Amino acid sequence: MDDGLFRHSIFAARFEGDSRVRLVGRLDASQAEAATTALRRLAGPSVADCADLEYISSAGITVLLEVYKRLHDSGHSFVLTNLSPRIRNVLGYAGLDRVLRIE
């Protein structure tokens, strides 16, 4: 039975329907493959709630960019919400606050 939760070690993606996911824990190189697999489930306009995302590395940023590109190329939006100041700063330092839609 699908409970809408994808877990892998220290990262989890909790799906709330087909278009909303809550990212939980640490999205780093050790979790990138699992995150990529989980986030392939997003197919239309989507929202990633990052309230429980504690850490993101360059590998995690790459995962988010791949999701953004895939959805954008299909004509869909990808929005990041509830970013902690720390995560928001990381994305800002990388210049991704001008690419990704952050609310």
Image: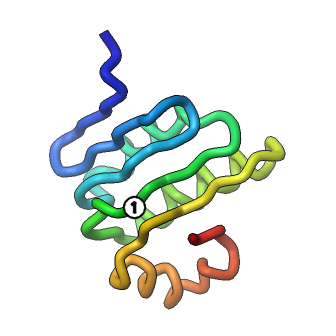
- In the displayed structure, would residue 30 be above or below residue 84? above
Residue 42: name its quadrant. Answer: top right
- In the displayed structure, would residue 14 be above or below residue 26? above
Which residue is most to the top? 1
Q: Is residue 3 left or right of residue 17?
A: left
- 22 and 30: which one is in front? 22
* Residue 47 image offset from top left, x and y in percent: 56, 51
Q: Is residue 74 left or right of residue 79?
A: right
- Residue depicted at 28% across the width and 53% down the height: 24
Q: Is residue 23 visible?
A: yes
Q: Is residue 38 left or right of residue 1?
A: right
- 88 and 30: which one is in front? 88
Which residue is most to the bottom? 93
Near mark 1 (Cα within 10 A), the count class, few <14, some 14-19 or many ≥20, is: many
- Residue depicted at 80% across the width and 48% down the height: 73
| Amino acid type assigned to the residue bearing label 1 in the image | Cys
* Residue 70 image offset from top left, x and y in percent: 69, 46
Residue 25: name its quadrant. Answer: bottom left
User: How does the figure colour the protein chain or chains?
Assistant: rainbow
* Residue 57 image offset from top left, x and y in percent: 35, 70
* Residue at mark 1: 50
